[in-house]
Each structure stands twice: as C-alpha cells, then as structure tokens.
Amino acid sequence: MSDWSRAVGTRPVEDHATTVGTATGNRGLQIEEKLIFEQDSPGRCGVDLVDPLPFRTRLGGLERQGRIGLPGLSEPQIVRHFTRLSQKNYAIDSGLYPLGSCTMKHNPRLNEKLARLPGLADIHPLQPVSTVPGALALIDTLAHWLKTLTGMPAIALSPGAGAHGELCGMMSICAALEARGERRSRVLVPESAHGTNPATAAACGYAVDSVSSNPRGRVDIGALRTKLDTDVAALMLTNPNTCGLFEDEILEIAAAVHAVGAFFYCDGANFNAIVGRVRPADLGIDCMHLNLHKTFSTPHGGGGPGSGPVALAASLAPYAPLPWQARGPDGPGLVEHKEGDAQQSIGRLKGFHGQMGMFVRALAYMMSHGADGLRQVAEDAVLNANYLRVRLESDLSLSFPGPCMHEVLFDDRFLTGTGITTLDFAKALIDEGYHPMTMYFPLVVHGALLIEPTETESKASLDEFVETLKVLAAKARFGETTFFHGAPHYTPRRRLDETAAARKLVLRWCAEPVNQQAEE
Amino acid sequence: MRYLPLTDRDRSEMLAAIGVDSVDALFADVPSAARLEGLVDLPKAKGELEVERAITEMAARNIAAGSVPFFIGGGVYRHHIPATVDHLIQRGEFLTSYTPYQPEISQGTLQYLFEFQTQVAVLTGMEVANASLYDGATACVEAVMMANRLTRRRKAVLSGGTHPHYREVCETYARFVGFELAALDPALGDAEDLTELVGPDISCVVVQNPDFFGEIRDYSDLARACHDVGALLVVVVTEILSLGAIRPPGEMGADIVAAEGQSLGNALNFGGPHLGLFASRDKYVRQMPGRLAGQTIDADGRRGWVLTLSTREQHIRRERATSNICTNSGLCALAFTIHLGLLGETGLTRLARLNHATAVGLAERLERIPDVQLLNRAFFNEIALRLPRPAAAVVDALAEKGVLAGIPVSRLYPNRVELAEVLLVAATEMVTTTDLDRFERELKDVLS
C-alpha cells in the first residue's frame, strides 16, 4: 500500500486499463463521434415532407441561390449522434453536482411533463387574451407564490435569466432615481459578488465601486459606510453571500443604504438557503432577482434557458418592465403598453411575456413542496452544507469558521507546498465520478473551492463524497503530484488546451480545403 | 416530501455530527427580527397527482393552437417538431447539466454548441455565430450595442419594419445604457428610405427581413450605404425558416445578424423560452456578447471543444465585459440543432418551400375577398392585410368561431390609427387546405 492509502486506510482500486489502446479510439461506452457536418450525405434527410401543389412563387426574386451547407442525415443517425454526445456530459441525473452558487438540485420530471401540456406549450403569446385565461391564471399564481416567499409587493416576471433580472432591477432603480430628479453615478458591489453584478451596473452606466470583505467573510460595514453617499445609486449584495455566509449585519447595511437615499439590490442566486424561512422584504431589500433555474428547480439545460423574475418593493414597483400582470373584472389580464398605472414602466426587456415554460416548471415545483416543503428545502440545504463543513474541515482548509448556509467555502491552504492547485484537485475529483465544486470563486480567498450540495443529496451520497475528498486530500499531502497534474484520466477528453482555443479561433466547422489536384 | 432524501434520523445524526441541537442554530446569523417562526401563508405540500390535476386544469382553459385553424405569427411560429427533438433534449445528460465550465465532462454540450454555431453561421450567410442569447429581441439590442462598441458611435437607426417588441427592448436599453435610437414609424411597402438616414454619426442601421409585416426586401444597397460611412448593417430575422428560401443577410452585406430561432425545434410556449441567434463577421468576434464554443485539442492531442474568448465575459472581465449575459438558451439551441440536423439541406429547403406555398395559397384566397387588400409585394410565410374595419374586432369575432386568425397590429401599436385595420396572418406547414378554406369562409362571413 502507498503512503496515502495507509494514511486514510483505503486500498486504491487497481487500474489495469490505462495502457490498453483500441482500434477505434472508443473506450467501451465512450464512443468517438464526428460532427454532423462530417456525416453528410447530400440528399439524405431525416424528415419526410410532402411536396406542395404547384404554386406561383412570390419571393420577389430574392430566392436563395446555391447550397446552404447543411449536412444530410437520417433520423437514426441523428438519434445516435445526440445520444452519444449526451454520454459525454456529466449531469445532476448522473451524480453529485456541487457547483457552488449554482444550486444544482434534482429537476423533477413532473415539471417537464406539465410544461409540455398543449394548453401551455402550444399557445401563442399574441393570441387573443380571451383564449388564454388559464395561462394568465398560472402566471398570476406564480406571482403570488413568489411575492409571498419574498414578502415583496410586486414581481416582474419577464427577465430571461438572473443577469437579465439584475438589469431589470438596476434599470428600475435608475428610473426611480430619475423620477426623484436624481442622477447618481456609483453602484457599490462587494468584492465577493458574481461577475454579473459589476457587469450589470456598468451596462447601466454606473461606475462600479468595490467594497471589501471583513475577516469574517462578510461585507465590511465600516468600509461600506465610508463609500456611501448621495452619489451612490445602489448597493448590489448577494445574500447569503458567495462565501456561503449570511450577512448578519444586513439590517444595519440596509439602514445605511437607505439613509443616503440609495436602493438595496439583492442578488437572489442563493435564495435556496433561506426560502420559506426568511423573507427578503424583512431584510430591508428593495429589489431582488430570483433564478427559477436555481432555487425553483427548472433545468439548467447545459446553460439555459433560465428565468429571472425580480421582486420589487413598493418604491420600485411603478417602474417594473412590461408586460404587467393585471387583475380585471374577468380575472387575470396583461398590461402590454405604457398606459394607466404602467406609464412609468421602464418598458420592455424581452419579447412577449417572459419564460412561460419555466413558470410552469417553477410553479409545479413550489406546489409540490408547499409552504412546509419549501422551508424544509432551505433547512436541508443548509444542513447538508454544514455536514460537509464539519466532515471536511480537518482535511481541506475552511475559509471562515462557524456555521455556513447552503454552501461551504474552502481555499487552497491545504494544498500549500504540494505543487497541486485547486484546478488539479478539481480535475482529480472528475476522475472519481464527481462534478467539481466551483473553483477560484469567490475571489476573496485564494484558490477557492465552493461546495453547494443542495437538499436533494442523501446523507449516504454526502458520506461517499466526503470519503472521496479525504482520499484526494491525503494523496495531495503525500505528494502524488503527477497523478493530480495528469487528471482527469478517465474522461472522454483529458485536459483541453484553452489557450490554444483562444489563440487560434475555430468557432465553426468548415469543409476541408478542396484538393485541387484531385479535382482536376 | 418525495424530492428530499434526508430522513428525520439522518437529520438528527447530521445535527449531532455538526454539534448543534437543532437546525435553527444554523440560521443563527439571521437577525431575529427577520426570522419567520411559522410557515408562509401558502398551501401545503401536494402529491404528484394533485399538482398535475391543478396545472392540467389551468392548461385546459386555454385554446391550444393545435386544436383550431391557426394563423398567428408575429415573431413566433408554429411548426411541426419531429418527436425525436423532444425525446433527445430530455436526456438527463443534456437537460440537467450546467454551463460547460468543465470541458472534460461537458463535451456533449460543447460539441453540439459548435455544431449549432456552424448551422447558424451557414444559415445566415455569416462567418461566425455565438452559442445563443435569450431571444430575438435581446439579440437585436445586443447587436446594436455591439455596433456601438465597434464603431465607437452611439446612434442607431431602427427601421419601422422591425418587430415592435424588438423596438421597445431597444428603446428600454437605449434609455438606461445610454445610446441614441432613431426608431422610424412603422411603415408598409416602400414608405421608408433608410439610406437617407445613414451618416457618419450612425453606428448601425437595423432592418428586419422578412419585416414585421411579412415583406421581403433586398438590403444590399443599404449595406453599401452603411459601409460607405463606416456604419454597420444589422439584419434581424424573426422567422429563421425563411432562410431556407430567401437570400441570407450575409449575402446582402449584413455585418451582424440577430435572429429568433424558435421556429426550429421549439414550441410556441406562450412566448418563452425562445432562442436568440447571433452571428457576425469574423473580424468582429471579440466584441460579440455571449458564450462561444471553440475547437481545441486535449492533453493527448485529440480534438475537443471548450468555451473560448471568455475574457470578453462577465465572470472574468466583470464591469468591463462585452455583456452581462451568463445563462443563455442552451437547451433551446439543442432543440434547434437537432431539428435542423434532421432537416438538413434538403429538408430545410423543402420545409421553407412548403411554408411559402401555404402562404401563397392563403394570400390568393384572402385577396379575393371584397375590400380586403393584401399589403405585400413579396413575402415568405406571413402577410399583412388591410381589412375594411378594425382588425381587433375581426380577430375576436373569428376566435368566437374557433379560428385564431392572426394578429391585429393594433395590439402592438394601439395608438396608431392608420394601422387599426391591418391584420398580420401567418401560414406554416401546419395549416391545411381545409384550414385555408375555413379561414376564407369565416372571414367573408364576419366581414359581410
């Protein structure tokens, strides 16, 4: 037995396969798959369509000329192609996905089924309002649930994702300030914030002023106070923050922000930690986006679609983007133009009425849990993260002592002197069958490893994860440097050269240059 | 609760391991004034059956497009989605994975994004495309902001033929992001001369093809006029299927194409989620918003894919990013890729032809109704008609008769009296000859 395995009392699993080559390059279930463009056979088609009856073209002479350049594949080829591609992906369905601040929880399939009901998926956003009362009732119900959970009086549903919700919030704040005849120039953003926060503030023309953290991983309220003045439009704060900590001085922070007439924007990416237990309105928050694809379980889909409703205090509600949900004598309706109460609206942020498909899924999720289940979600998410914290704090280096919320932050002090980086450690975790935690974020600690297990992991799953991390930490301590530097070993691809990708950009497939000699 | 694996016994053991008496101790950092002691005032947990029943009841109160003759478009089109599409996108490995930050275990997502980018580029006739944006409207405003960055100018001209929602999104961003927008009044036919407005202070001209009223035009002259003064031409496409039949923006000289990709692979969904397509010239790629999948090699020299040029993006660049976008429309892009993969060159061309044939059939039937005037000279699968009376009332009357007849333009432009009688009607491959006959008959009846 090696040093590290004696240390953790584990016998390493013998590996006999690493040197075996195959004729195809395939390795069992890992099958090499060409691009669809490399499987083209001109004229082949995966859809059978009738030919139209003879007709007189009315394209005004703008007919497309020549080949488009799309490959021809049959249905079985397409099914196989995408099935093989899917097998090269890690997913929540395959295992623990502890990506901090991303809330990779189980995605219930009931929600998928309901979002596909013809009465919800096969309705057009511009069909007469009188033909979609059920859709409007669903949106109204969703709004009611989200308003109740946040304690806020208004909710803007149209933003397409979290960052779009931030934009919605900051534009609303800007409009509210303009209505007061004020034009402020700065937005305060703690250094632990998601990158979208400063990017959003900058997009709205604000200068971004960074606020430092205190040694406890929270906003340094002293530093905050020195930066707060009547030129500050808003503070954008994530709570619980990206160190997995609740901002325990949040009421004082809110009071200080309000004292200079600024608005308190909260990034609700981490709402999962407090849903059903804390209402953001009770924390003095004026505006907060919710990621339905995080707390409310709508699938991340490999990077979207998301949905980023924004809960608004009464002071910001008049500026909410169009459309508004309205209640008429005949039930829920829509306000689609700047008219009546909506005259001060910032206007439209996106086509149509928002991410209806996500609304259906999120509502099904909330109804399934109910008030009791949602509170349990927050409690179990926090319990799971704290369990990982205590089980791992002697092996990894915990950044901030004491209880965390739904995610726990470690840094790379435990790797000091090993020649192994956070990246190496994360890549080794991939070989063990896990998706890595969030790496190098937040920026407030060195070599961050941010772990968010979510409430949908069992204790057994957490215990296995802990044992794996303990073994890896021991391997690192005992100097298995080569192992880490080479990881991952068992994936469809080993480490990919990102520098080369950025230096010599290949962003699309192109046909091989024609061999002129062969042509002639 | 069926989604929560922890048992009470697990919870007790875990609390003991943590060294606290109750879970409340873990929430000790929450100020006591803000702690909710009881439950929020919402219903309690429900079983799958009860939730399904409640939501199915809501769904049943809507008139689904598939249950009636249906002619609504206006930037969202009802097409047939092969069963394969929805089956494949629901594979858990696609559905339940995150943005592909760990490329070694995300090659599936990255490879299809690379295929998607290629499809979008060839379809639009452009050199490079990104991995999607939220929808066509946000893609349009991102195109304007990209043109502003590239030209270092801050005034855009927007054609009156641009979808009103796209225009309104541009107006919202213009006000808060801080650029000037010269948005022209909605115009039918030849009423608009954009070349006259092109000048050295203009960053870009935005046109839509086919435009909101269904009209197709050649914008090659406008592209030249833009380029002569260092401005860019942005072409918006809200019906991406049209590019299976008509000349793509790239061939007309477009610099940026912002499009809605819903038509391929994605359902109506009451307006979302949809799929923003974004393509441009190679030389502008470093100012593009959104994610890009790029080809590279791994440690063993094998071809693979990664997200690239992330130094443009918010998670690296923070307040200096080209856009604040993070999550995009990954799964909708997958649906698009699969549907277009199935169609291929032959299928796309044929489907586009079928749409055009159906729309021609529709136009021929409706323009022979007395007092109904077809306003298009050239169109793809959507037409504008001037009716002898306000279109909104006609649409409502037809809905009563079980025909979803199109969009009264007044719904989008309520204050423009000159458009009150204009009706937008789309006909895709989903429309049968019986539907066309029925529409003609019922419209005649309503107008008589």
Image (spheres, rainbow, N blue to C red):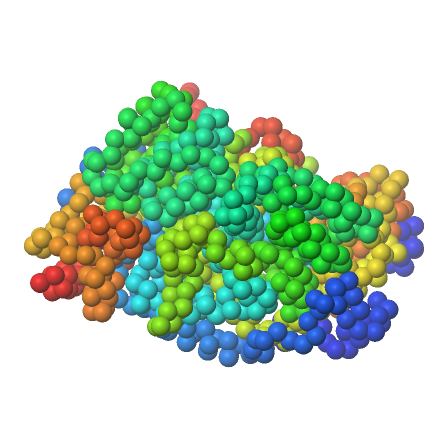
Q: Quadrant of residue A206?
A: top right
Residue nearest the viewer, comparing A88 with B289: B289
Residue A104: percent from left, percent from top? 64, 58
Q: Quadrant of residue B14?
A: bottom right
Q: Quadrant of residue B291?
A: top right
B28 over B140 or under it: above or below:
below
* Residue shown at 19% from the left, 53% from the top: B421
Residue B412: percent from left, percent from top? 31, 52
* Residue shown at 50% from the left, 76% from the top: B51
Q: Is residue B427 left or right of residue A82?
A: left
Residue A449: percent from left, percent from top? 76, 49
* Residue shown at 43% from the left, 63% from the top: A325
Residue nearest the viewer, comparing B77 with A227: A227
Q: Is residue A477 left or right of residue B397?
A: right
Residue nearest the viewer, comparing A96 with A350: A350
Residue B186: percent from left, percent from top? 27, 42
A166 over B285 or under it: above or below:
below
